[in-house]
Image (spheres, grey):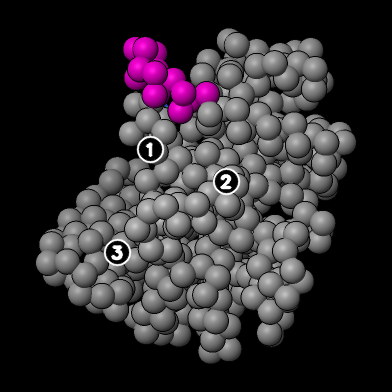
Amino acid sequence: MNILVFNSGSSSIKYRLFDMSRVSVIASGVLQRIGESDASLVHKSVLADGSHQSITRSQQISDHRQGMQQINAVLQQTSLRRDSPPLRGIGHRMAHGGSMFHHPTRIDASVLDAIRQLGDLAPLHNPASVAGIEQALAAFPGVAQVVVFDTAFHQTLPPHAYRYAVPRDFAHRLHVRRYGFHGTSYQYVTRQAARRLGRSSTSLNLIALHLGNGSSAAAIRGGISVDTSMGMTPMAGLVMGTRCGDLDPAVVFHLLRHTDLTPDRLEAILNRDSGLLGLCGHNDMREILELAAAGDDDAQQAFEVYVYAIKKYIGAYYAVLGRVDAVLFTGGIGENSAPIRWRVCQGLQGLGIVLDPDRNDACPPTGGSVHAANSPVAVLVEPTDEQLEIAEQTLQTIQGSDASFTPP
Ligand code: ADP
């Protein structure tokens, strides 16, 4: 039983084809530079003996329509030949589901219309995913398609966590509130952590830290999200690779008054030129760690600011949860950087969070427990797999177990 997962950006489409009966990847690919004359499609098929076969194509791809047609053609030629198991469904990643979507949802005309209306809430993210869905519907006719929202896992936040203290009208008419993101990742790592601890996720209180280019924290009570650091958009919360994280909103007005920046340009700067990049000129944590170790002042400060923000959220979410069973690290930085995990947990012994330095340093890419034997709170490294989570939610939805849509 095969499920295909798409993650469509404004100039790229990434995809992965899963064999769900064996929970394994049978093909993956990325199409980049859509809209340019030298767009490239790199496709990899996993052969029966486990080896890879790569196909690279470079040509002009003017839009998502042509892009999806190309991807379909390569898949038909390789992993979706007539003699291959049939394609059971397609799952699409969508950043923003607003307050409307609480679950993965089977796509039909009314769902697509509702998603288009959400474009105002996420103008930087949703329109490209919508284009991907529209073109996948055309390129793969007759295949059931499902949309999986990054916000859905956080739809369980109580009003005191999702409301902003602004006039009620902004909330009611303009949908201004906290939504939170990285929900697909949190759902996946919560289940994995429960498995590792040999407990049910409904019995677990977790502080989960997704630390990648985009970084966020979540307070999870009994397997359900009760608070998270990203807000109406993915710009809020922790310091990120290029996004500023939490900021006094008055800074925006100060900058608009004292520079000739337009609101759009300032938004782009706070999204793409801020965070670690703004602090030290680099957004790759590996480079920052190397520079900091070599004595670079800006890199050292960026590292300190990054770690400090995470620590503050751990303290805040400890207070929110009252009892914490485990702190989870995931994302490219959380999974791979022992020094970041060490510094984040340093000084948290009073909260019952005690890391074992050797286990932390030796933690393999497959994840593991890194706390000391006497640590009241477990500290886990859980590699995330958002694509697999989308594939699993897609299959469940198609099989009718989890579909739900509340019309606006
Ligand atoms: P995205 O949010 O784009 O999915 P990832 O989760 O892949 O990003 O995380 C990317 C980040 O992970 C980069 O900052 C990269 O430097 C960092 N990273 C990857 N490996 C390591 C490592 N061994 N040590 C420190 N940082 C790492």
- The front one of 51 and 392 is 392
Residue 181 on the magenta span: no
Q: Which image quadrant for residue 34? A: bottom left
**Nearest-to-viewer mark from 1 and 3:** 1
Q: Is mark 2 within 8 Å of ligand 1?
A: no
Of pointers 3 and 2, the one earlier in the residue sequence? 3
The residue at 60%/69% (across/down) is 97
Secondary structure at badge 2 equals loop
- Find residue 247 and name its label: 2
- Find residue 387 and name its label: none
Of pointers 1 and 3, the one earlier in the residue sequence? 3
Q: Which image quadrant for residue 299? A: top left
The answer to whether residue 79 is visible is no
According to the picture, the residue beneath numbered tag 1 turns out to be 277
What amino acid is found at the position of numbered circle 3 in the picture? Ser
Q: Classify 226 as above or below 320.
A: below
Spatial CA distance of label 3 from label 2 is 29 Å
Q: Position of residue 356 (x, y in %)?
A: 65, 13
Q: Local crowd at mark 3 within 10 Å, few (<14), some, or many (≥20)?
A: some
Q: Position of residue 118 (x, y in %)?
A: 55, 76
Q: Classify 339 as above or below 246.
A: above
The residue at 68%/64% (across/down) is 177
The residue at 34%/12% (across/down) is 294
For the magenta stretch, what is the residue range? 289-304
According to the picture, the residue beneath numbered tag 3 turns out to be 11
Of pointers 2 and 1, the one earlier in the residue sequence? 2
What amino acid is found at the position of numbered circle 2 in the picture? Leu
Q: Position of residue 108 (x, y in %)?
A: 55, 86
Q: Position of residue 281 (x, y in %)?
A: 33, 34
What amino acid is found at the position of numbered circle 1 in the picture? Leu
- The front one of 68 and 347 is 347
Secondary structure at badge 3 equals loop
